[in-house]
Image: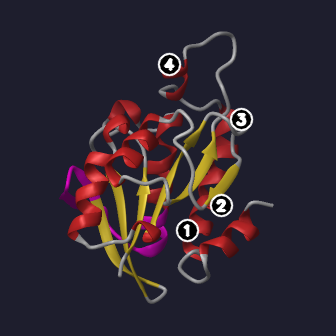
Amino acid sequence: MAKLFVGLGNPGKEYEQTRHNVGFMVIDELARRWGLVLNQTKFQGILASGIVLGEKVILCKPLTYMNLSGECVRPLVDYYDIGVDEVIVIYDDLDLPTGTVRLRPKGSAGGHNGMKSLIHHLKTEQFKRIRIGIDRPKNGMKVSDYVLGRWTEEEKIQIEQAIQKAADACERSLQIPFVQVMNEFNK
């Protein structure tokens, strides 16, 4: 059975390097590390697949826009017969300080529209997540403007480290149970 890594974000040049696209950035890093090419367009997503550390893996960046991510992931899970316990979703989190990485075995959407869509389409909250902190907007800035905004120079350094750490956690999940990966990375 394949392991599915889904990074949440929005397609298109105008969204590259925005806070909301950190999930896409982790998928790009995994593809780079694992020598996989994101060039298959299926199920409203861009995919790469291969064997990594003896495991079949599929990388996915939904092209549905954030709020409809489940419309990509559900048919993908069905087609490849992937159990939700083999799905890891990587996404931005306003409730964590910038650059913080937190792993969870399951949970609610926490107000994140991409996660709401996934929970709705997968009909469960029982899938693994890697959350990357982007902090909350300051000075009364609208959340939508903030998440679609670009990183400051200081944040870029923190986010690059977080991307590496999240990718390390994904890689580790191919070697040991996710609960052990959580214990290792949530320190």
Which residue is label 2 attached to?
165
Answer above or below: position of 88 versus 179. Answer: above
Instruction: Look at the numbered discs 3 and 1 and tell me whether their residues touch, using CB distance below 8 Å.
Output: no
Q: Secondary structure at mark 1?
A: helix
Q: Which residue is pictured at 69% across the width and 75% down the height?
A: 180
Which residue is label 4 attached to?
145
For marks 4 and 1, give the CA distance. Answer: 29 Å
First of labels 3, 1 by sequence position:
3
For marks 2 and 1, give the CA distance. Answer: 9 Å
Instruction: Look at the numbered discs 4 and 2 and tell me whether their residues touch, using CB distance below 8 Å.
Output: no
Badge 4 crowding class, 10 Å Cα cut-off, few under 14, some 14 to 19, many 20 or more, is few
Q: Secondary structure at mark 3?
A: helix
Answer above or below: position of 56 versus 170. Answer: below
Quadrant into which the C terminus falls: bottom right
Q: Is residue 151 left or right of residue 20?
A: right
First of labels 2, 3 by sequence position:
3
For the record, the magenta segment spans 30-46
Q: Nearer the viewer, mark 2 or mark 3?
A: 2
Which residue is label 1 attached to?
170
Which residue is label 3 attached to?
154
Residue 120: horizontal and vertical position, in percent?
36, 45
Q: Nearer the viewer, mark 2 or mark 1?
A: 1
For marks 3 and 4, give the CA distance. Answer: 19 Å
Q: Which residue is pictured at 69% across the width and 66% down the height?
A: 182
